[in-house]
Image (cartoon, helix red, strand yellow):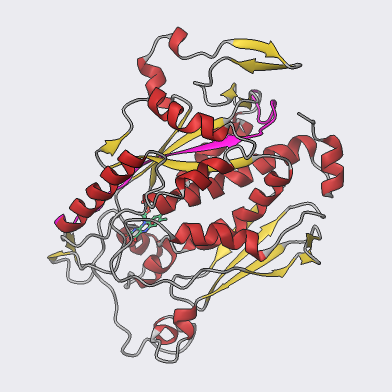
């Protein structure tokens, strides 16, 4: 089975990842991983004057002559800012020696992991919490998950996300989103066409008018010194019927997708298909009628988002996630100093105003291992050839 680990701090020397459980014989390049890493860095709503080096993950093991060997794949992402001659980070993040004059951070930001991290580990400094809870970690997560994404691609499964709501601006109904996204996903590229189309907008929205309004909304909230979250949708096409389980609670595919999304920084909810809207509708406006065409069963609609009984129906998966507004904001909130217990204003650090367009790439990525594992469970083998032999042709 596929699993992955990430290690490293935001301002440490590097992020490290291990992606493990991918069969031998999968074509994998650093360029494939880099494409999604760079996408994760792009999007309207980034903090002002932020200049970024392109993230690049170096493959250090598990790949030979462009093909996976079946061995664990280790990935390394060097932090160039740490390495610069005038960088203070080696001192702040030193693994040995004394603290010396390195400043302690004592003002926790509401909504971030700052205070709970200090309470959990007994630190007298928020720095180690920030270093690990920050979304910088998602760069390595995207890299590791891109390995699973490449595996799915080989089997014709494509994942693509788009933004449907930022703050108060968004589509009016489920049907409006369907007419914006579904025909795009029906192309030969499947859901890959969804992200490629959405990526043409810097807020990753498929609708031009809404994109403009979303940009205005972000601009307005930036001026006010606050932040924004929103809702995105991920489509997965080319998924065969029968992945997941209605028998075991812990193998129900919707449950596993929820874990992957909710395990991502700032995610506060997930819906499959109509999700919460299904609770407001009658049965006939929720359940998808079954039909038979071209030698396979299909559904006339896909309001349940490609899952019944925790098992894929063969229709595209439709997954929605909600991201809360970013906790670091220009206009302060009240907080209490962890040393003095004095009530003070939070201090502003460089931060995004709305990271949702970037978070879509993270969400696309984290669901790839879930689907890859459901496939490995059903059609698993040690090599791609073995898996392809067992995999159903559609
Ligand atoms: C792609 C992405 C970018 C983020 N950027 C920021 C940021 O610039 N500033 C910030 O305070 N939080 C940012 N966050 C959110 C925090 O990482 C998150 O709120 C924090 O780790 C607390 O975890 P929780 O929100 O899951 O409770 C970002 C999250 C994601 C997914």
Question: Does the stretch in magenta take in 155?
Answer: no
Instruction: Report which quarter residue 121 is drawn in.
Output: bottom left
**196 left or right of 211?**
right
Q: Is residue 137 above or below residue 359?
A: below
Q: Position of residue 349 (x, y in %)?
A: 27, 69
Total marks shown come to: 0
Magenta span of residues? 224-246
Q: Please tell me in which quarter of the rendered image ligand 1 is found.
A: bottom left
Q: Position of residue 92 (x, y in %)?
A: 39, 82
Q: Is residue 385 above or below residue 306?
A: below
Instruction: Report which quarter residue 351 is drawn in.
Output: bottom left
* Viewer-side residue, 271 vs 205: 205
Quadrant position of the C terminus in the picture: top right
**3 left or right of 8?**
right
Residue name at image x 70 percent, y 14 percent: 293
**15 left or right of 64?**
left
Please tell me whether the stretch drawn in magenta is mainly helix, strand or loop.
Answer: loop
Residue name at image x 80 percent, y 57 percent: 70
Question: Does the stretch in magenta take in 237?
Answer: yes
Q: Position of residue 262 (x, y in %)?
A: 46, 43
* Viewer-side residue, 126 vs 299: 299
Q: Is residue 333 visible?
A: no
Q: Position of residue 154 (x, y in %)?
A: 73, 46
Instruction: Report which quarter residue 41 is drawn in.
Output: bottom left
Q: Is residue 271 visible?
A: yes
Residue name at image x 47 percent, y 57 percent: 40
């Amino acid at each position: 089975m596929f699993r992955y680990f990430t290690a490293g701090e935001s301002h440490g020397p590097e992020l490290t990842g291990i992606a493990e459980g991918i069969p031998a014989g999968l074509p994998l390049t650093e360029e494939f991983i880099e494409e999604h890493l760079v996408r994760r860095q792009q999007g309207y709503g980034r903090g002002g004057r932020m200049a970024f080096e392109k993230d690049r993950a170096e493959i250090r093991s598990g790949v030979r002559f462009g093909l996976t060997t079946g061995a664990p794949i280790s990935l390394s992402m060097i932090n160039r800012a740490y390495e610069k001659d005038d960088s203070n980070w080696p001192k702040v993040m030193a693994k040995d020696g004394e603290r010396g004059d390195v400043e302690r951070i004592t003002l926790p930001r509401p909504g971030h992991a700052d205070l709970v991290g200090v309470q959990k580990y007994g630190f007298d400094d928020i720095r180690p919490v920030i270093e690990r809870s920050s979304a910088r970690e998602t760069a390595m997560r995207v890299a590791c998950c891109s390995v699973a994404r490449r595996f799915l691609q080989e089997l014709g499964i494509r994942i693509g996300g788009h933004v449907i709501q930022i703050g108060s601006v968004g589509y009016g109904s489920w049907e409006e989103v369907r007419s914006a996204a579904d025909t795009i996903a029906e192309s030969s590229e499947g859901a890959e066409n969804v992200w490629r189309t959405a990526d043409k907008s810097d807020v990753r929205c498929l609708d031009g008018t809404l994109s403009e309004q979303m940009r205005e909304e972000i601009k307005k909230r930036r001026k006010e010194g606050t932040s924004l979250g929103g809702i995105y949708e991920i489509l997965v096409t080319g998924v065969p019927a029968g992945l997941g389980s209605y028998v075991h609670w812990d193998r129900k595919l919707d449950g596993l997708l929820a874990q992957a999304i909710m395990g991502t920084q700032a995610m506060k909810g997930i819906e499959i298909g109509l999700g919460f809207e299904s609770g407001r509708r009658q049965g006939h406006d929720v359940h998808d009628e079954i039909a038979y065409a071209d030698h396979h069963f299909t559904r006339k609609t896909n309001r349940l988002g490609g899952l019944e009984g925790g098992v894929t129906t063969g229709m595209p998966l439709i997954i929605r996630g909600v991201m809360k507004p970013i906790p670091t904001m220009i206009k302060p909130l009240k907080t209490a100093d962890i040393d003095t217990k004095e009530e003070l204003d939070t201090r502003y650090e460089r931060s995004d105003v709305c990271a949702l367009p970037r978070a879509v790439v993270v969400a696309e990525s984290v669901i790839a291992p879930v689907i890859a594992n459901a496939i490995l469970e059903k059609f698993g083998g040690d090599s791609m050839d073995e898996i392809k032999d067992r995999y159903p042709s559609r």
